[in-house]
Image (tube, grey):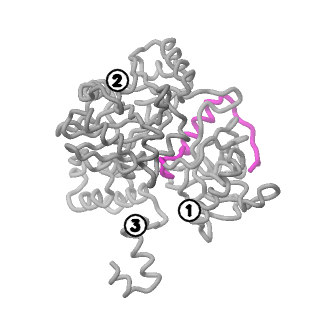
Amino acid sequence: LADLLKKLSGEEARYVLRIPLGQLRLGIGDPTVMEGLSWSVTGDKTLRAPIERAYNVCCDLGAVARIFKSDGVAALEKIQVKVGNPVRMALAERAKSSEDIVTRLGKCAIEPKYDGLRAQIHKNGDDVRIYSRNLEETTAMFPDIVEGVRKQFKAKTAILEGEALAYDSETGDFLPFQITTQRKRKYDIDEFKEKLPLKLLAFDLLYADGKDVTRLGYKERHALLEKFIVKGDTLEVAEQVVTQDAIAIEKFFMEKIEHGLEGIMAKRLDSTYQAGARNFNWIKLKRSYQGHLTDTVDGVIVGYIRGRGMRARFGIGALLVAVYDDKEDKFATVTKIGTGFSDEEWPKLRELLDKIVKEKQPARVDALLVPDVWVEPKYVIEMQADEITRSTIHTAGKTDNELGYALRFPRVIGFIRADKKPEDATTVKEILKMFEKQGKSGEVTNEE
């Protein structure tokens, strides 16, 4: 590579280096490429679904494209989960109450919703690899989980999923997400392993001893998971109750809230594992605050406004934040936010953002508001708001005939979510559903 770079111009070298770094920055996302593959064969996007299913299973868009173009769409059905190839993780829809869960699922599995780092574990003998929610390999960061899986998981080959949480070794209590994320580091790993030990609460199994089990029902997969885990210090099966009683679900929910957890998950007992899908096979119910939305919003920073007044010294005072429009593969603005970061966090945030500054509005950003500084859509933050309103100046959900949607009185409740890619942010569809669940038409606002 060094010899090649010597022969290239500065412009050529810049683009060549993006290949081994995996940062091509083409201005398009994976969904656009998948639609393009379909169009290249049929002249429309009718084959997008089977292409996406194959991509969700193997997460190698290049391999999917090669198979699709050489062997046709039927060959994509033969792609199976494989140890060592991360699988796009299944996601949950939202519920507004325990009664809503029972109406949708009937008898179902109810589990705690842990506020930790989602992890997908691939085991091949003693070779254990860990992948994050956004499919980055994080094995080196969590040697305690690696050792725990080696000792406690008895299948020779496996893919399992769970949530990694830091806990107080004296009380056994789980620690907040902001503490757990301190374990996601490249340095001082051994020191923090002792300081902040982790537990992996396993809740699903995708592959075991040579068999793809994603097409089994959740009840069967969970039974296999329990069979393979032996008692130990690191690996545990997530707590679960099976019921169709809304009162029992509400009681379980309140118990978890009292213990400081986010809420609960409900899972359809006969549901297959649908890689990369967000649907009502899995439903989350999170704590509700009076005067707040019943769920948080994960937004993508697309720009910032320079600091004024007390924040002038930081050079940054507010963020322009977007949600993901998965239909258009773009990021549509939903709020301008400046509340929730500490004086210590603002300088750190600006340092991160100044590394990804864009000279002009990024191609994948749909915005009417213009910030002082545009940035590449990369970092995800977690926000709480009082409600969602119709907006004349934000583009989330905006069409030629419809106003957009915006967060009212937003505040940041979580620093950068390193476990999420921009495409993992809350979607425009979810914003519309949250707006409908408010039970009101929502006033129109031109607030930024």
Q: Taking 280 as reference, is 289 left or right?
A: right
Front position among marks 1 and 2: 1
* Residue 351, percent from left and from top: 61, 62
Q: Which residue is mark 2?
A: 269
- Count neighbours of disc 2 (C-alpha within 10 A) and say few if under 14, some if 14 to 19, many if 20 or more: many
As for residue 51 lying within the magenta part, the answer is: no
Q: Nearer the viewer, residue 43 or 73?
A: 73
In the rendered view, tell whether residue 255 sits above or below residue 65. above
Does the residue at mark 1 contact the one at mark 2 (Cβ under 8 Å)? no
Front position among marks 1 and 3: 3
What distance separates the C-alpha of mark 1 from that of mark 2? 40 Å
- Count neighbours of disc 1 (C-alpha within 10 A) and say few if under 14, some if 14 to 19, many if 20 or more: many
Q: Nearer the viewer, residue 132 or 176?
A: 176
Label whose residue precedes the other's in the sequence (1 or 2): 2
Q: Secondary structure at mark 3?
A: helix
Q: Secondary structure at mark 1?
A: loop
What distance separates the C-alpha of mark 3 from that of mark 2? 41 Å
Q: Which residue is mark 3?
A: 21
- At horizontal 66% and vertical 54% (from top left) the residue drawn is 320
* Residue 226, percent from left and from top: 28, 25
Q: Amino acid at mark 1?
A: Glu
Which region of the structure is painted magenta? 419-448
Q: Nearer the viewer, residue 71 or 321?
A: 321
**Residue 376: assigned label:** 1
